[in-house]
Image: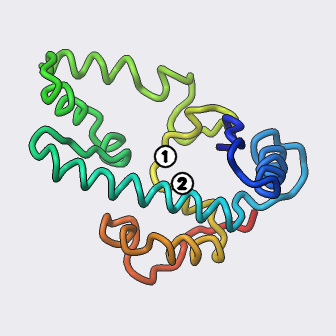
């Protein structure tokens, strides 16, 4: 939201917060501002929760014609994209998949290695779980109260786990 300035539709006080957060975190203007506020965390947790539950419903409806791919899985094993090609009925040979993966690496697309952050880029860092580094303890507690069951179930955290490496923004 901050990188692409998608602030429309939010209440005025949240848009003001997002502008301040963008200046501090993306434009790095030297000002201090938390990365999240309560409204944004509630919004993001709701979107994430709806997406996960929508995926589950799609899997019920489409059965074997549905594939769930997690970002973490694709980072670990990029050739898993071949499963999508196969489902779509396109060439999923090892050669085609390898060629597509090689042409679309983070480094190829950005000129940066994974982990090298560019705050204002759409392809920011290519690291799974980096959200943990940006949540304050209060952010983590709120997000957990809204989506903790799915965080646990999907293996992102275990119940009651503390935020590891949280920062105060």
Q: Crowding at label 1, few (<14), some or many (≥20) Cα neighbours within 10 Å?
A: some
Question: Residue 99, how many percent across, how many down?
Answer: 27, 16
Mark 1 and mark 2: Cα distance apart in space: 6 Å
Question: Residue 45, how many percent across, how many down?
Answer: 52, 62
**Quarter-wise, where is residue 17 in the image?**
bottom right
Query: Are discs 1 and 2 less than 8 Å apart at CB?
Result: yes
Outermost residue, left side:
64
Does residue 97 appear to the left or right of 116 in the view shown? left
Residue placed at 69% from the left, 60% from the top?
A: 36
Residue placed at 17% from the left, 25% from the top?
A: 88
Question: Residue 78, how many percent across, how many down?
Answer: 29, 34
Residue placed at 32% from the left, 40% from the top?
A: 74
Q: How is the image coloured?
A: rainbow
Residue placed at 55% from the left, 63% from the top?
A: 132
Q: Is residue 150 above or below residue 82?
A: below
Q: What residue does disc 2 label? A: 130
Image quarter hosting the C terminus: bottom right
Does residue 40 appear to the left or right of 73 in the view shown? right
The circle on residue 127 is 1
Q: Crowding at label 2, few (<14), some or many (≥20) Cα neighbours within 10 Å?
A: few
Outermost residue, bottom side:
160
């Amino acid at each position: 939201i901050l990188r692409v300035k998608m602030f429309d539709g939010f209440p005025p006080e949240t848009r003001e917060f997002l502008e301040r957060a963008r200046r501090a975190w993306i434009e790095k203007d030297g000002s201090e501002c938390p990365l999240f506020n309560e409204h944004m965390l509630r919004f993001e947790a709701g979107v994430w929760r709806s997406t996960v539950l929508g995926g589950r419903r799609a899997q019920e409806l489409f059965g074997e014609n549905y594939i769930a791919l997690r970002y973490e899985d694709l980072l670990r094993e990029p050739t898993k994209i071949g499963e999508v090609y196969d489902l779509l009925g396109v060439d999923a040979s090892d050669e085609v998949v390898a060629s597509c993966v090689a042409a679309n690496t983070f480094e190829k697309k950005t000129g940066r290695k994974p982990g090298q952050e560019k705050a204002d880029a759409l392809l920011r860092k290519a690291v799974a779980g980096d959200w943990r580094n940006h949540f304050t303890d209060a952010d983590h507690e709120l997000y957990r109260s809204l989506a903790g069951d799915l965080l646990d179930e999907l293996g992102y955290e275990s119940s009651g786990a503390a935020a590891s490496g949280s920062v105060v923004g």
